Image (cartoon, grey):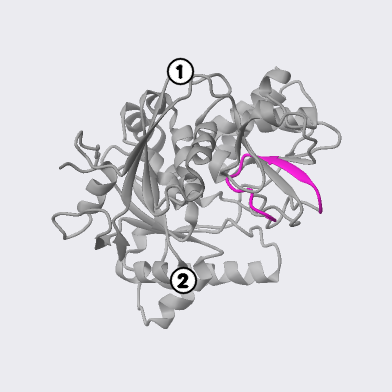
Amino acid sequence: MGYTITEKILLDHTQVKNIKPGDIIQVDVDFIMTNDISGPVSVKQFEKMGAKKVFDIERMAIILDHFTPNKDLSAAEACKTMRNFAEKYGIKNFYDAGSGIEHVIMHEKGYVKPGDLIIGGDSHTVTYGGLGAFSTGVGSTDLAGVMALGKIWLKVPSQLRFVYKGKIPEWVGGKDLIIYTIGQIGTDGARYKTMEFSGEVIKGLEIEDRLTMCNMAIEAGAKNGIIEPDDKTECYMREEIGITEYRVYKSDDDARYEATFEFDVSNLEPQVAVPFSPGNAKGVSEVTGIPIDQVVIGSCTNGRLKDLREAAKILKNNKVHPKVRAIIFPGSKKIYKQALKEGLIDIFINSGAMIAIPGCGVCFGGHMGVLAEGERAVSTTNRNFVGRMGHKSSEVFLSNPAVAAASAIKGVIAHPEEVV
């Protein structure tokens, strides 16, 4: 019996010779990451356990991105804690306010490679499966142990395979595929399981869309999301990141899967996840015309350059509706600079949109875009739970960047075809 790509990565990071779903194994970690929310708790536990040093200062990154620039005194103290920790233990991979979102910076800086095993203090660490890595988020106490030892105990997840067939329609991308998928299996349909995405449609996706899909695997409860590396992955690693040395794993033909799901997406329209769950998937035509107050384009889900280009294509020579606040936040400083160079920022500003600093604040209702009572937003982020962006009666509709941009122009949820 063969192994999946996830199982092969786990096998090569443990001393165990054979594994099966449900086994508890200790694995060696290639890289760890934390931020200004989970980090201070991990630091406290790290020092409480008597650790004297980080297992490898070259294989840890601290990225301050949630409540930065400091929202209030509490945020300022949390960030100060992480700055002091980085200085005390010599953590060189330290990124302060404005550098960008952790799940964008991590692969931009080459900290993510195919075949790696990566642990992060954030649930959306699953993003890196888009490059063929095993990556997952853990709690702050678990992360403290990894910081000290470079090892962690994991349960081998059951394996689910998702095969996408057909020709992907215009205005449909990775965000739509994953919202549709979660709608099919539910928000607990992959609980503590691997979501392995494959098929001709996945092979045709750009890396940005693959990262988006894996980013939202956690919204189905998955332990990790993953896509086999291919020629596009190799090109991305070589041309964009400048790395050519890494381990490539592929699933065996006789690998064991708990279940296989096949979807023909030839007729799939852009998807919108309506409140209050990422699993409430609907075609955009089912929800067009719903009035909105705010549009958010960015985040670790859709804040990459491809996403900004897509939004700019819609917003160019158009104006944001006077009753809508449109907020655009690039995923990193690097993306921000390239968007400036390409004239995308000019397009956004001329349309009436606001440009926010790269960070996570808008996504989770932390700051820079909190919704008031009864307000609605269309957002390219990954969660739309009750109170996610502000007041408990506010509503968040999740979409791809094109739908979000079109909605910003119309003042209601809209299909991109309505404005182009």
Residue 238 picture location, percent across and down? 34, 33
Work out whether residue 365 or residue 56 is closer to the camera in this orientation and state it: 365
Q: Is residue 318 above or below residue 396?
A: above
Residue at left 31%, top 27%?
231
Q: In which quarter of the image is the C terminus?
A: top right
In whole angstroms, how far apart are the C-alphas of marks 2 and 1? 45 Å
Left or right of 373 in this view: 153:
left
Quarter of the image where one finds residue 77: bottom right
Give the structural element (helix, strand or loop) at label 2. helix
Q: In this view, does 92 lie to the left or right of 398?
A: left
Q: Where is residue 206 in the image (x, y as percent from the top left)?
A: 44, 28
Residue 75 appears in the rendering: yes
Q: In this view, does 398 lie to the left or right of 241?
A: right
Rate crowding at label 1 as few (under 14), some (14 to 19) or many (20 or more) other CA atoms within 10 Å.
Answer: some
Helix, strand or loop under label 1: loop
Q: Which mark is residue 383?
A: none
Q: Do the residues labelled 2 and 1 touch (CB within 8 Å)?
A: no
Of helix, strand and loop, which mostly describes the magenta segment?
loop
Rendered location of residue 114, percent (x, y): 31, 42
Residue under label 1: 167
Q: Mark 2 points at which residue?
A: 42
Up the image or down, 58 lies above or below 205; here it is below
Q: Where is residue 44 in the image (x, y as percent from the top left)?
A: 48, 77
Res. 328 visible in picture: no
